[in-house]
Image (cartoon, helix red, strand yellow):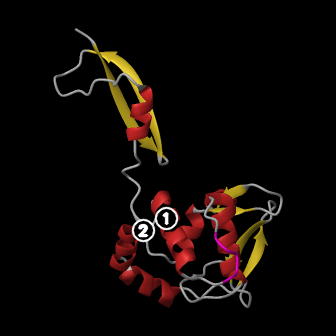
Amino acid sequence: MSKRTIFGSLAGGVAVLALALVAAPAHAAEVPASPVAVVASATPDSQPSISELQAKAKANAGEVSALRVAYPHCDDRIAYGSSFVYVPFVYASSNMNCILEVGNNNRGVSTLQQALNSCYGKGLVVDGAFGNATYNALLQVQSSLGVTVDGVYGPGTRHAMKFSSYYGGCYTGASIGL
């Protein structure tokens, strides 16, 4: 005999639910009478909390130390490519292989904050100060992108994350050759 069962998954933090008529094994969950109950009970369990992300960042401290040795700190921004995508860079050397971390205070941080706001909806104050709010927003974005969760903006994060363009829209670093 067939029973209605529900299948759920998370796609980008959004619950995706599908109903199917299948020969249900004894352990399958039956569809509740109210579909609203299904939506209300669907929570994005795969989204780690800020404290979990901060613990991951601490565990990746060795990689952060290596980044500090290998790359200078970003201090400005540049409009890159034909789309004029703003990315942090080092003014003196025009080098985009640079890092931003807690304690930095410059236009590079403002550019990162703007990208986090316009491309990821983070709602940060764009003040150029890399503090706790920027750090936590960056942890969340790094986790969602599947890159090393360390709270430091560096080449790996730059390649994966989206940046805002002068003309509007957001482009990943990879899509514009970063």
**Left or right: 96 in relation to 166:** left
Q: Amino acid at mark 1?
A: Gln
Name the residue nearer the viewer: 49 or 98. 49
User: What span is in magenta?
Assistant: 124-128
**Neighbourhood count class around disc 1 (C-alpha, 10 Å): few under 14, some 14–19, many 20 upward:** many
- Tell me, yes or no, whether the highlighted magenta stretch contains residue 121: no
View extreme (top): residue: 1
Say the numbered circle drawn on residue 140: 1
Q: At x 68% / y 82%, what residue is drawn?
A: 128
61 w.r.t. 161: above or below: below
85 w.r.t. 54: above or below: above
136 w.r.t. 73: above or below: above
Number of numbered callouts drawn: 2
Labelled pair 2, 1 in contact (Cβ < 8 Å): yes
Secondary structure beneath dot 2 equals helix
Q: At x 19% / y 22%, what residue is drawn?
A: 25
Secondary structure beneath dot 1 equals helix
Which quadrant holds the C terminus? bottom right
**What residue is pinned by disc 2?**
50
Q: Amino acid at mark 2?
A: Ile
Residue 88 pos. (x, y %) = 68, 77
Name the residue nearer the viewer: 51 or 73. 51
Q: At x 41% / y 55%, what residue is drawn?
A: 47
**Neighbourhood count class around disc 2 (C-alpha, 10 Å): few under 14, some 14–19, many 20 upward:** few
Residue 55 pos. (x, y %) = 34, 74
**Left or right: 126 in relation to 158:** right
Say the numbered circle drawn on residue 25: none
Residue 141 pos. (x, y %) = 52, 63
Q: Assign the magenta stretch its main secondary structure.
A: loop
Disc 2 to disc 1, C-alpha distance: 8 Å
Q: Earlier in the sequence, mark 2 or mark 1?
A: 2
Residue 127 pos. (x, y %) = 70, 81
